[in-house]
Amino acid sequence: LAPDTDDDQETDIAVVLIQLDGSQITGSDQNGLEVQAPDCTIDGLVLTGFGDAAIALEPGSSQATGATGDTVWGNFIGVNQFSPHTKNLIAPANNPNANGVGIEIESSNNLVGGTVPWDRNVIQGNHDGGVIIEGTQGTGNTIASDFILDNGGDGVLVLSSGNHIGQASGSQLAGGGN
C-alpha cells in the first residue's frame, strides 16, 4: 500500500492571525462573541480568555429569530495553536487562554465544524464545557468533526432534544480527555 499522503486527521496546523482575547475584561460573565442574528459565519479566529462563552449563539423571541442557521468553523477556542503531530495536553485550571465555556448554543439549526477537515474547530482547555447546547430553542444543531479536548467540564453537553453529534458518514467526534 502507498503511504497516506492525504491524512484527513491533519487539519489544524493552521496559523490563525486574528485573536480575540478577553483576559483583560473585568467580570466573569463576558462572552467573546454574542450572535443574535441568523445565517452568520464565524471562522478563522482564536478566541481566548473570556469569563463566559467564547461564542454564544443566542435565541431570539421566536424560532424564526435569533442565531439560527449559523456556522462556526476553523477556529481555535481556548488555545492559540494546535498540532496533531504532538501531544497538546492542557490542564484547564492552568490554561491562561481558557474561556469559561467554548461554545454555548441556545438557538436552532446551527453547524459547529463540518464535513471536511478544514471545517474543524479546536475547542480545548476551557474551564467548563467545550460545547453546551441548551434551552427550548436549542434544537436541530450539529456538532461535527471538531477536536474537543481537555475541557474542565463535558466535551459536549446536550441538554436540548433534536441535536446531532458526529457525522452520518461514520466520522467520529473527537472528545477524549474531557
Image (cartoon, helix red, strand yellow):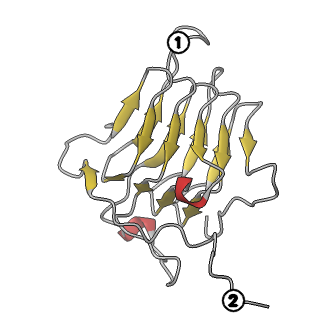
Q: Which one is closest to the eye, mark 2 or mark 1?
A: 2
- Quadrant where the N terminus sits is bottom right
Q: Of the residues under marks 2 and 1, which one precedes in the sequence? A: 2
Give how far across and how far down residue 28 sits, in percent.
31, 42
Which residue is located at x 49 percent, y 60 percent?
122
Callout 1: few (<14), some (14-19), or many (20+) C-alpha neighbours within 10 Å? some
Quarter-wise, where is residue 116 in the image?
Answer: bottom right
Give how far across and how far down residue 178 sits, in percent.
61, 64
Could you tell me which secondary element the residue under label 2 belongs to?
loop
Could you tell me which secondary element the residue under label 1 belongs to?
loop
Q: Is residue 67 above or below residue 51?
A: above
- What amino acid type is highlighted by mark number 1? Thr
Residue under label 2:
3
Question: Who is closer to the viewer here, 8 or 80?
Answer: 8
Give how far across and how far down residue 8 sits, in percent.
64, 69
Residue under label 1:
65
Q: Which of the numbered marks, if any, corresponds to residue 48?
A: none
Q: How many marks?
A: 2
Question: Who is closer to the viewer here, 98 or 173?
Answer: 173
Q: Is residue 66 above or below residue 112?
A: above
Residue 24 located left or right of residue 129? left
Q: Is residue 87 above or below residue 147?
A: below
Q: CA distance from mark 2 to mark 1?
A: 49 Å
Q: Is residue 46 above or below residue 15?
A: above
Which residue is located at x 32 percent, y 61 percent?
97
